[in-house]
């Protein structure tokens, strides 16, 4: 299958999952995870209709930003206000503070913030813009992954909400790997419940739930995901 065909298939599956959940398809943003894939693959996905792209590595993001700015996505008109200006970047990996300058102010959303120090650095490096961020929660307590525990999330959410220059817009999580998509459901429902509690605590909405990947995004949609991070199902296997 081509990237365009894979993109269309993913769109159809997301729309069907939304229908089963009684949600409009527009409720869910598909973030095409383009890490390790070349700029030409991003151009192909953009030409097929994808707007949102996720990267895991700060230097790779910077390289692709430079390349795609110099040569706009294939098939996209170059006039001001055209769809060429609708391409949105997401940073979805763990970010070291010394790499924040490569990300801050350049992406629509940073999905995995798990410290006040990182939020402060993003705010400092955003060039006066407000950087939207998500609180990364490690609901399974996996030592190999970043994110805070559910128990530590309320205190950190309050601290992140107070960082001038960042906007805490929601939560993200990544369940333990499993071949069974249903194994992710407790983590997705747990993140939604935690989000609701934190929104009540903060007295403000936290509209974004970033959860679900190629193997379990339909379960995530059923559990309330607003952003699903899909790589393999769109771009094929990574090199």
Image (tube, helix red, strand yellow):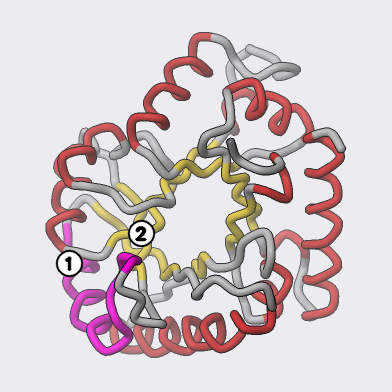
Q: Residue furthest top?
A: 70
In this picture, is 85 found above or below 121? above
Q: Which residue is mark 1?
A: 162
Front label number (1 vs 2): 2
Dots 1 and 2: beta carbons under 8 Å?
no
Residue 155 lies in the magenta stretch? yes
In this picture, is 118 found above or below 209? above
Mark 2: give few (<14), some (14-19) or many (20+) Cα within 10 Å: many
Counting the numbered discs, the total is: 2
Mark 1: give few (<14), some (14-19) or many (20+) Cα within 10 Å: few
User: What residue sits 56% from the left and 89% below the top?
Assistant: 186
Q: Give whichever of discs 1 and 2 has the lower sequence position.
A: 2
Image check: 74 left or right of 53? right
Find residue 211 and report its horizontal and vertical position in percent: 54, 68
Q: Which residue is mark 2?
A: 112
Image check: 232 left or right of 128? right
Tell me where residue 27 sits by quadrant.
Answer: bottom right
- Residue range (magenta): 144-163
């Amino acid at each position: 299958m081509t990237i365009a065909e894979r993109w269309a298939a993913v769109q159809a599956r997301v729309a069907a999952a939304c229908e089963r959940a009684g949600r409009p398809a527009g409720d869910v943003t598909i973030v095409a995870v383009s890490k390790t894939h070349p700029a030409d693959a991003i151009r192909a996905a953009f030409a097929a209709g994808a707007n949102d792209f996720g990267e895991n590595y700060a230097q790779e993001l910077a390289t692709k930003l430079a390349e795609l700015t110099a040569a706009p996505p294939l098939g996209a008109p170059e006039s001001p206000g055209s769809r060429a200006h609708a391409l949105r970047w997401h940073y979805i990996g763990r970010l070291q503070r010394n790499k924040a300058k490569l990300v801050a102010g350049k992406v629509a959303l940073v999905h995995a913030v798990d410290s006040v120090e990182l939020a402060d650095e993003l705010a400092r490096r955003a060039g006066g813009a407000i950087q939207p961020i998500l609180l990364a929660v490690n609901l399974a307590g996996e030592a190999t992954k970043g994110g805070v525990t559910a128990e530590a999330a309320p205190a950190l959410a309050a601290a992140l909400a107070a960082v001038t220059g960042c906007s805490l817009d929601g939560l993200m999580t990544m369940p333990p790997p499993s071949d069974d998509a249903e194994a992710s459901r407790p983590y997705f429902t747990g993140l939604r419940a935690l989000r609701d509690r934190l929104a009540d605590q903060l007295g403000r909405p936290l509209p974004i739930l970033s959860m679900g990947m190629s193997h379990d995004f339909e379960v995530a949609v059923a559990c309330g995901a607003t952003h699903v991070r899909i790589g393999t199902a769109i771009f094929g296997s990574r090199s």
